[in-house]
Amino acid sequence: MLCACGGGDGGGGAPPTPAPTPAPSKVTLAPGNYQDAVKLSMGVASSAYAYAKLGVGIVDRWLNVPLPFFPVVSCPGGGSMTIELTDRNADRTLDPLDTVHFHWDRCRLQDTTTTGVVRVELREATPSANGRDYLLTVTVAELEIEHDGQPSATVNFIAQVHYTHDDTFDHTELSNAVFNSGQVIGDTGTATLNIDYRQDGATQTYQYSLDGTVSSGALGGEVQFSTPAAFSGVIGEYPSAGRLQVMGNANSGARLAEEGAAAGNVATVLVDLDSNGDGVADTSDAQLAWSNVVAAQLFAAYPDQVAIAVPMP
């Protein structure tokens, strides 16, 4: 303001550009943190997938359905939810190139209170005789979710989602998904990731792959993760094959894999640490319970998978 009024340095120049936020440093994986790094990588991907699924569910619910003339909805336990539509063709329905906005204001349902915004921009929607094909952008802005007796989380997230479905498969792809906050409850940090998840109803099998980067306040820095071998298995069960690789500082790495003794037990998975990149595990858990890594719902049939606990009309 001083520069604009001729004050300050007297030169009338533009204010200095703020210094960029320094990138988080990579975490060195060690016996005390490698399992946490693996669980965080899987947890972040599961959270991103749940928000993508929320976006797909919104399109399924509201595509070509007239929005209510009274857009404010009272929530069962108090508070409200408001529905808005950026309606390019003014037909009061969600069509391609429209955006639907959901605003929750202390909206309470059972043991959950929600405040914040979810926007779904429908870029393409192609129906077929036995399925559908959506391309959409899901944006979550300052969405605070409070569960009674648990820490609250405030989520900021955006992702490009491509979803296809027919009589025999569901296929969800997330591209350039970004968490600016709220990636997992009880932790701070950011994440960028991609997910490819396909369920085949004809064979009752799935394939689940992911890659990205996550920073964590609890870990104290950043790790990279990828699936050199996609996780696969029977729908409704934990994976029977696949491998996640997590990379930290100084060539340190952790592995989550259906190998060794865990390969014969669908409820367990191998996790190990290579602290210096020499290809030799320094410590491991040969049969870590999958339930300690990610919820079993992630691998359930598509309609029964993980969901975000926000009230919907």
Image (tube, grey):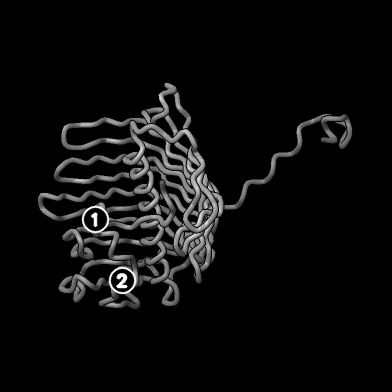
In the rendered image, the vertical position of residue 37 relative to residue 224, given as above or below: below
As helix, strand or loop, the secondary structure at mark 2 comes to helix
In the image: residue 57, left or right of residue 300: right
Q: Residues within 10 Å of mark 1 (few under 14, many from 20)?
A: some
In the rendered image, the vertical position of residue 307 relative to residue 272, given as above or below: above
Query: How far apart are labels 2 and 1 at the CA level?
Result: 19 Å
Q: Which mark is residue 291?
A: 2
As helix, strand or loop, the secondary structure at mark 1 comes to strand
Whether residue 83 is visible here, answered yes or no, is yes
Most extreme residue toward the top is: 89
Q: Circle 1 is placed at which residue position?
A: 230
In the image: residue 92, left or right of residue 143: left
Q: Earlier in the sequence, mark 2 or mark 1?
A: 1
Disc 2 or disc 1, which is closer to the eye? 2
- The amino acid type, in three-letter code, at marker 1 is Ala
- The amino acid type, in three-letter code, at marker 2 is Ser
Which residue lies at the image location 35% right of the left edge and 33% below the top edge?
Answer: 65
Q: Residues within 10 Å of mark 2 (few under 14, many from 20)?
A: few
Which residue lies at the image location 83% right of the left edge and 33% below the top edge?
Answer: 3
